[in-house]
Image (cartoon, grey):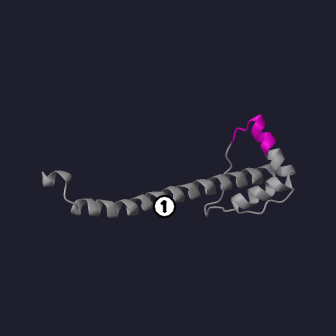
Amino acid sequence: MRTNGSGSARKSLPLSAQDLDDLERLRRSASHRNALSLLADVEIPANASEASLLHAVLEAGLRAVREQVEVQGYAQMAEQIDASPRRTSARRRRPAWADE
């Protein structure tokens, strides 16, 4: 797990009953821990603390957000690249009304 150079901070995080159930499932289920390990890019042991599980979930979420931002950025770049030849050829074409 990544840490920033300035240390770490403990924040209060309200958890619902469902959140607590999900964390317990992550702790008990090897397949859930493995999936979270892949998403967060960290190793999560079977005896992981609640804090380390929460941090891994945060890392996985942030990683997913970064990847989605990249996907959207690449899509915008592709649209701009695809649109630019059409714009150039449209400027070279005679308007339909020019033959009237």
User: What residue is at 86 percent from the left and 57 percent from the top?
Assistant: 46
User: What residue is at 16 percent from the left and 51 percent from the top?
Assistant: 97
User: What residue is at 48 percent from the left and 61 percent from the top?
Assistant: 74
Horizontally, is 96 left or right of 14 in the view? left
Horizontally, is 84 left or right of 17 in the view? left
Secondary structure of the residue carrying tag 1 is helix
The residue tagged 1 is 74
Horizontally, is 19 left or right of 88 in the view? right
Residue found at the far top of this picture: 17
Q: Out of 20 and 90, give the one closest to the viewer.
A: 90
How many numbered marks does the figure carry?
Answer: 1
> What is the x, y in percent for residue 24?
83, 45
Residue 31 colored magenta?
no
Residue 14 in which image quadrant: top right
> What is the x, y in percent for residue 85?
33, 64
Q: Out of 33 and 74, give the one closest to the viewer.
A: 74
Residues rendered magenta in the picture: 13-22
User: What residue is at 85 percent from the left and 52 percent from the top?
Assistant: 29
Q: Main secondary structure of the magenta part?
A: helix
Q: Out of 5 and 37, give the one closest to the viewer.
A: 37
Q: Out of 73 and 11, give the one closest to the viewer.
A: 73
Q: Is residue 20 visible?
A: yes
Pointer 1: residues within 10 angstroms few (<14), some, or many (20+)?
few
Residue 20 colored magenta?
yes
Residue found at the far left of this picture: 100
> What is the x, y in percent for residue 1?
70, 62
For residue 90, above or below residue 14: below
Q: Is residue 48 visible?
A: no
> What is the x, y in percent for residue 84?
33, 62
Horizontally, is 49 left or right of 14 in the view? right
Q: Amino acid at mark 1?
A: Tyr
